[in-house]
Image (cartoon, grey):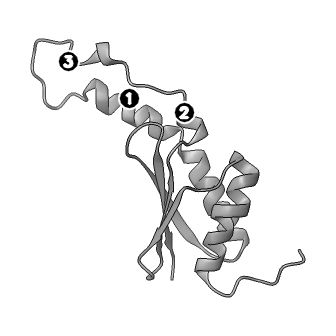
Amino acid sequence: MERPRFGDHLEAIKFICKDFWSEVFKKQIDNLKTNHRGTFVLQDNKFPWLARMSVDPSADNVSSVEDYSAPTAESKAAQAMSMHLYFPCGIIRGALSNLGIPCAVSADISSLPACSFVVRIKA
């Protein structure tokens, strides 16, 4: 409440990466990238909610029939893990919305437990 409103989007994103993320997840964002045109990528190399997840290696291609339309075990696992990122995407979007910055947030899992959140500012 003592701080003035943020002058630009980058200041608000830096606030999310440092102060806000520290309060919610007890650590800062590991890396912040931007294209300076309204897209920001927040990289967390050890996201707490994914830290204890793993892919079951025994679930690889157990069927002998090759059905390319059926989802593989790896894609099912990635889909299940990505569901755990809907809520943190909503947290980021809600925080920025309350700062007066409408945006869309999506998440990507590169390798466990690392993930990145892509914030696209709406014009």
Q: CA distance from mark 3 to mark 1?
A: 13 Å
Judging by the rendered image, the residue that carries numbered circle 2 is 51
Query: Around disc 1, counting alpha carbons within 10 Å, would you say few (fewer than 14), some (14 to 19), or many (20 or more)?
Result: some
Lateral position of residue 69 relative to residue 34, left or right? left
Q: Position of residue 88 (x, y in %)?
A: 60, 49
Identity of the amino acid at label 2? Ala
* Vertical relation: 53 (above or below) 115: above
Q: Position of residue 16 (x, y in %)?
A: 66, 64
Lateral position of residue 108 relative to residue 19, left or right? left
Q: CA distance from mark 2 to mark 1?
A: 15 Å
For image coordinates 54% across by 33% down, the residue present is 51
Q: Nearer the viewer, residue 8 or 95?
A: 8
Lateral position of residue 72 relative to residue 115, left or right? left
For image coordinates 53% across by 44% down, the residue present is 85
* Disc 3 element: loop
Callout 3–callout 1 Cβ contact below 8 Å? no
Query: Around disc 3, counting alpha carbons within 10 Å, would you say few (fewer than 14), some (14 to 19), or many (20 or more)?
Result: few
Q: CA distance from mark 2 to mark 3?
A: 25 Å
> Mark 3 or 1 closer to N-term?
3
Q: Nearer the viewer, residue 120 or 51?
A: 51
Q: Position of residue 82 (x, y in %)?
A: 45, 40
* Disc 2 element: loop
Judging by the rendered image, the residue that carries numbered circle 3 is 61
* Vertical relation: 89 (above or below) 34: above
Q: Of tags 2 and 3, which is closer to the observer? A: 2
* Vertical relation: 99 (above or below) 115: below
> Mark 2 or 3 closer to N-term?
2
Residue 77: assigned label: 1
